[in-house]
């Protein structure tokens, strides 16, 4: 895949940073706090990547608007109670991003996180300067709507055929399909390889840092 892409767009949670178990805990805590049924771990994983409002609405169907607001607020408070650092990134991710940027690739993030949540994570992991643009679910449409990918490509002036989405969930890969761009899956996050393969990624990696060898060719 050497020289095939100009723009590489990464999901954040479960793709670059090892946060899936913590997100599951935060969603379960929100359900317990608000008197809802506590979701099973895989059910919680299945909504990771959606905006938090859409995720809670899907995970806790039938709740009223007030409860939905309480769920999202509790989730965010719990999530932010843990201090992240660069060590939370998957092994080799920081060095991979640095090498890709130095090699001339435009790097971006497309995430279901809020802007506040992503900014805190970028600063805590010292990765903000590595990305030319980041898009979050509270400033555009939630995955799998392709709007955030279209916005990133417009900003970077990258063509569809020169753009690549890297993600760990079906929402990431469906978004790439909807935007008509290529995708690579990583199986270290929300969904296993057999599920991700249904969305026709170019390849499914076990760890995100393996992407470096793929891109080097």
Image: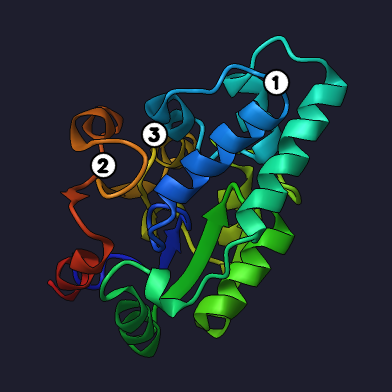
Does residue 42 sit above or below 192 in this rendering?
above
Dot 3 lies on which element? helix
Observer-side mark, 1 or 3, equals 1
Numbered disc 1: secondary structure: loop
Location of residue 57 with respect to 180 vertically, above or below:
above
- The residue positioned 36% from the left and 79% from the top of the image is 94
> Cα distance, mark 1 to mark 3?
29 Å
Residue 170, labelled with which disc?
3
Residue located beneath label 1 in the image? 35
Give the residue displayed 46% in from the left and 54% down from the top: 13
- Mark 2 or mark 3, whichever is nearer to me: 3
Mark 1 neighbour density, 10 Å: few (under 14) some (14–19) many (20 or more): few
| Residue at image coords 26%, 76% | 92
Res. 170 visible in picture:
yes
Q: From the image, which quarter does the N terminus lie in?
A: bottom left
Q: Residue 201 — which label? A: 2
Quarter location, residue 216 = bottom left
Q: In the image, is 193 to the left or to the right of 26?
A: left
């Amino acid at each position: 895949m050497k020289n095939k892409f100009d723009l590489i767009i990464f999901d954040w949670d479960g793709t670059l940073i090892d946060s899936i178990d913590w997100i599951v805990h935060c969603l379960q805590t929100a359900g317990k706090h608000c008197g809802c049924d506590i979701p099973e771990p895989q059910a919680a994983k299945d909504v990771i990547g959606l905006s938090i409002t859409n995720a809670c609405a899907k995970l806790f169907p039938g709740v009223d608007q007030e409860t939905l607001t309480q769920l999202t607020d509790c989730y965010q408070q719990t999530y932010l109670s843990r201090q992240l650092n660069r060590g939370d990134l998957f092994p080799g991710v920081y060095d991979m991003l640095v090498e890709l940027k130095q090699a001339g690739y435009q790097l971006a993030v497309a995430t279901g996180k809020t802007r506040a949540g992503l900014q805190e994570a970028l600063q805590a992991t010292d990765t903000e300067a590595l990305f030319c643009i980041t898009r979050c679910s509270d400033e555009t449409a939630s995955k799998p709507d392709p709007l955030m990918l279209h916005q990133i490509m417009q900003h970077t002036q990258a063509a569809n055929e020169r753009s690549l989405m890297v993600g760990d969930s079906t929402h990431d890969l469906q978004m790439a399909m909807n935007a008509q761009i290529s995708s690579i899956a990583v199986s270290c996050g929300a969904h296993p390889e057999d599920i991700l393969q249904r969305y026709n990624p170019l390849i499914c990696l076990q760890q995100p840092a393996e992407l470096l060898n793929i891109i080097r060719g």
